Image: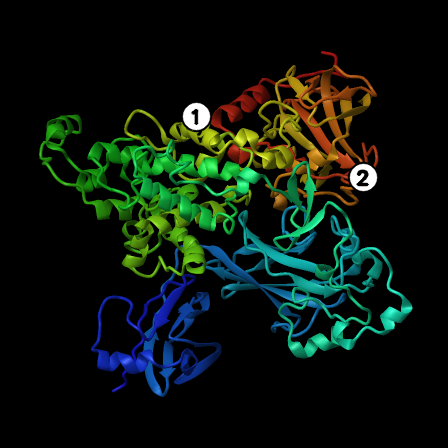
């Protein structure tokens, strides 16, 4: 009888990672005489394979071979159609088999995108222009659905929204995958500015591309860079050296070892046999060994940095470092930074929290005054001033309180409805409240009972019982109870535990997913802090912006940060947690971490160096004639958003007569009347650095309906112009200098001869030339700079105001006159 056995889930859900092992991590134990021989087997001698039943024969799936005592497998949609699946492990000749029967997954999503060659095989060499790649999108539960797949040019390595989309194609999902082919075209590369990325004089030996897939506005993670040989690449030795050109004699003496080929980054993923064919013919100087001879330049932490204004600018990351941002949180006998935030806990507890935060803050991008202030303001509300993080979230709810917190227990399906039958079945009924409940809900047979906490958790947190916005990945029975809230910000749900598990495995070597004990370990002080910090790192809003980035420079905790963390729940004291968090931020944590002194804020968010063009900028929801609906939601956005027709700017709804502001420091370049635009003002930005520092990450809200990121020839290095149109009254003149926030005009509907049901400010950003009337050329989407609310973000009151004005009929002003 074999001494080896496979431990793991024989009924995995497709799309969810499962671990399989020859060791029992789940509780039972065998006598040591059976375990010792297995424990001593080297990992390389433990081989795993997956077999499928084809007809009457078992066939080995070679691509699923793995080695090690514990391995991971994620079964795909195709596995549901198999007649039989078996997993086999061979440990030094001792074999074991586990029959697998996969289960369907209720969730539909894109798993990942894989880059293959034109024949659908893994690439073994670099790509060149003229060649074709296959982008294979692996999907879950999306059979015959249509998805969009986009090829991007990586403009600088960050894979952010300044990148240019080269081409978007549609494809149908069949058997869990969708294949799309892209051909690398030098003309498209030119349009994407591939030859010169920002802050680079040359794109280098390779042009870098990547691919994303989109399904109902959910965008996949970008693929790794796809390197395409740059046919125009030529090494410029002078641009890499410090002061002088090497003599001809010195060049001839260069040894073969110094003839540098592509860097590790440039040859990532390429077979060694293929690299030799792409070696450079010229010498490439290693920039790490050559430093520009400048008295203000030093090599610090392996980056080229420059001292500007008393602090270091990391030129390789374009990140301005504030000393307070990177400073450790101090809890010792001389200083206690957390005392005011958590006054009712012990010194030792505050010390553990501070030390853990300091340990991981750089890895998790939380080394920032603003991130610290928001994180600990949230933690104060979640765990209280006593900092109690030992226990998992209590689910002991009284019957009458369940509908106030979970819609699944509300008869109306909305918060604050009457308790439904589930609430009465599982909720707590206290003795002093029994008679009241009997009379109020006409239930004379009610008796005192304890709450069934496990049942409440499994019902309340099951994704099927929650709105799309607040789903947490609980798709299996028992997920609600196992993955209930723990940690400093109450990490909740399988999806969040799985995301945090990536960080706990990498940074602390702890698995919090596969066992009850693993999930419970989040209650430990160190993991409670780490998982909560990880949440700020991986959590994104609807526009794809990570939570830690949202915190930076943001004072509106209640309106911007809190909605990305959880519902606005009652705290049982007549207050709501959003308001409490805002109070904690305003009155305590923002002062502890000195956000008003933060130099990062001053340089990167442009303190006092940006003002929105109107108060409370929101996009228009109606067209000139009064039509609205889905078409109206994208009618005023930038790109081909008007049934394919061009719209050069962003339309911001505003009541006529409202203030219009100078967004940035500048000079009035033009103030004139334009046909179709009415009275206009154009400001030439004079502080371009502050302008670009204000740039945010923005994802097109309606890319399928033609919204664009930018037009051709938008050049950051040229002059920048801000264009305001449909004004009623202009307060500035040509040549006048304007400061940030100056009221330059009042809004109107001038230029719209037939009148409009959708009064708005038409706002454009363009560069290089005075580009009025040049279609999308020289323009970028103003959404990168104007923090406006799209249709899905606007409140009911904001939507109703637009509707009310639209229904009143057309407002008419010609060239600014009523």
Relative to residue 227, is residue 234 drawn left or right? right
Residue 247: quadrant of the picture: bottom right
Residue 328 coordinates in the image, percent (x, y): 48, 43
Residue lying furthest front in this view?
Answer: 334
Disc 1 crowd, CA 10 A, few/some/many (<14, 14-19, 20+): few
> Who's the residue at 73% across and 70% down the image?
261
> Who's the residue at 29% across and 78% down the image?
5
Q: Secondary structure at mark 2?
A: loop
Residue 23 coordinates in the image, percent (x, y): 31, 73
| Coloring scheme used | rainbow
> Residue 76 or 81: which is nearer the viewer?
76
CA gap, disc 2 and disc 1: 43 Å
Residue 107: quadrant of the picture: bottom left
Relative to residue 807, is residue 414 drawn left or right? left
Residue 693 coordinates in the image, percent (x, y): 66, 37
Q: Is residue 264 above or below residue 429?
A: below
- On the rendered image, what quadrant is the C terminus found in? top right
Which residue position is annotated with label 1?
587
Residue 307 coordinates in the image, percent (x, y): 68, 42
Specify the label residue 718 is tagged with.
Answer: 2
Viewer-side label of 2, 1: 1
Relative to residue 208, is residue 572 drawn left or right? left
């Amino acid at each position: 009888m074999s001494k080896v056995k496979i431990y793991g889930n024989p009924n995995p859900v497709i799309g969810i990672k499962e671990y399989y092992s020859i060791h029992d991590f789940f509780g039972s134990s065998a006598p040591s005489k059976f375990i010792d021989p297995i424990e001593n087997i080297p990992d390389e001698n433990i081989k795993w394979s997956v077999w499928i039943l084809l007809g009457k024969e078992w066939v080995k799936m070679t691509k699923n071979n793995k080695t090690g005592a514990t391995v991971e497998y994620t079964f795909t949609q195709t596995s549901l159609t198999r007649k039989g699946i078996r997993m086999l492990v061979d440990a030094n000749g001792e074999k074991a088999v586990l029959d697998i029967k996969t289960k369907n997954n209720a969730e539909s999503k894109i798993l990942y995108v894989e880059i293959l060659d034109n024949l659908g095989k893994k690439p073994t060499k670099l790509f060149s222009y003229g060649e074709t790649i296959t982008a294979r999108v692996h999907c879950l539960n999306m059979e015959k659905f249509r998805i969009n797949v986009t090829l991007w040019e990586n403009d600088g390595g960050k894979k952010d929204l300044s990148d240019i989309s080269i081409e978007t194609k549609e494809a149908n999902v069949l058997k869990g995958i969708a294949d799309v082919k892209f051909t690398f075209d030098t003309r498209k590369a030119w349009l994407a500015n591939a030859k010169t990325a920002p802050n680079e004089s040359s794109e280098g030996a390779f042009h870098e591309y990547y691919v994303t897939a989109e399904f109902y506005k959910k965008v996949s993670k970008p693929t790794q860079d796809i390197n395409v040989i740059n046919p125009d690449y030529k090494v410029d030795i002078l641009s890499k050296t410090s002061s002088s050109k090497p003599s001809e004699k010195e060049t001839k003496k260069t040894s073969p070892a110094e003839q540098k080929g592509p860097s590790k980054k440039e040859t990532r993923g390429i077979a060694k046999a293929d690299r030799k064919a792409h070696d450079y013919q010229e010498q490439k100087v290693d920039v790490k060994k050559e430093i520009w001879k400048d008295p203000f330049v030093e090599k610090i932490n392996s980056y080229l940095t420059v001292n500007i204004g008393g602090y270091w600018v990391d030129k390789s990351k374009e990140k301005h470092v504030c000393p307070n941002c990177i400073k450790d949180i101090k809890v010792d006998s001389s200083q206690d930074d957390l005392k005011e935030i958590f006054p009712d806990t012990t010194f030792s507890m505050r010390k553990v929290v501070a030390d853990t935060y300091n340990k991981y803050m750089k890895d998790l991008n939380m080394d920032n005054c603003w991130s610290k202030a928001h994180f600990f303001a949230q933690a104060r509300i979640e765990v209280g001033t006593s900092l109690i993080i030992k226990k998992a979230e209590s689910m002991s709810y009284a019957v009458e309180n369940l509908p106030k917190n979970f819609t699944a227990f509300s008869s109306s399906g909305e918060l604050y409805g009457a308790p439904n039958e589930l609430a009465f079945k599982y909720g707590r009924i206290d003795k002093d409240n029994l008679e009241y409940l009997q009379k109020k809900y006409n239930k004379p047979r009610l008796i005192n009972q304890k709450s069934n906490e496990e049942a409440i958790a499994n019902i309340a947190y099951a994704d099927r019982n929650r709105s799309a916005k607040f789903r947490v990945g609980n798709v299996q029975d028992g997920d609600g109870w196992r993955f209930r809230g723990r940690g400093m910000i109450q990490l909740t749900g399988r999806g969040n535990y799985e995301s945090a598990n990536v960080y706990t495995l990498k940074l602390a070597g702890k698995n919090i997913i596969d066992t009850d004990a693993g999930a419970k370990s989040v209650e430990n002080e160190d993991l409670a802090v780490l998982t909560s910090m990880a949440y700020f790192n991986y959590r994104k809003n609807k526009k794809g912006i990570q939570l830690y980035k949202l915190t930076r420079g943001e004072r509106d905790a209640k309106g911007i940060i809190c909605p990305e963390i959880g519902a606005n729940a009652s705290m049982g004291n007549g207050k709501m947690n959003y308001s409490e968090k805002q109070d904690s931020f305003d009155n305590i944590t923002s002062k502890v971490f000195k956000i008003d002194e933060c130099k990062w804020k001053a340089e990167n968010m442009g303190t006092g160096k940006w003002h929105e063009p109107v108060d409370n900028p929101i996009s228009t929801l109606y067209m000139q004639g009064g039509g609205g609906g889905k078409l109206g939601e994208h009618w005023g956005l930038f790109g081909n958003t008007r049934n394919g027709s061009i719209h050069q700017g962003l339309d911001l709804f505003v009541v006529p007569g409202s203030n219009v502001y100078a967004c940035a420091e500048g000079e009035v370049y033009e103030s004139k009347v334009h046909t179709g635009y009415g009275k206009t003002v154009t400001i030439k930005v004079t502080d371009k650095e502050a302008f670009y520092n204000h740039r945010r990450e923005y994802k097109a809200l309606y890319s399928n309906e033609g919204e664009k990121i930018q037009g051709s020839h938008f050049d950051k290095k040229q002059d920048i112009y801000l264009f305001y149109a449909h004004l009623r009254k202009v307060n500035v003149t040509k040549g006048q200098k304007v400061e940030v926030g100056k009221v330059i005009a009042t809004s109107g509907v001038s230029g719209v001869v037939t009148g409009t049901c959708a009064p708005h400010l038409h706002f454009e950003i363009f560069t290089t030339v005075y580009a009025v009337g040049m279609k999308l050329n020289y323009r970028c989407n103003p959404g990168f700079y104007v923090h406006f609310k799209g249709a899905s973000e606007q409140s009911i009151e904001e939507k109703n105001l637009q509707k009310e004005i639209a229904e009143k009929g057309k407002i008419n002003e010609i060239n600014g006159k009523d």
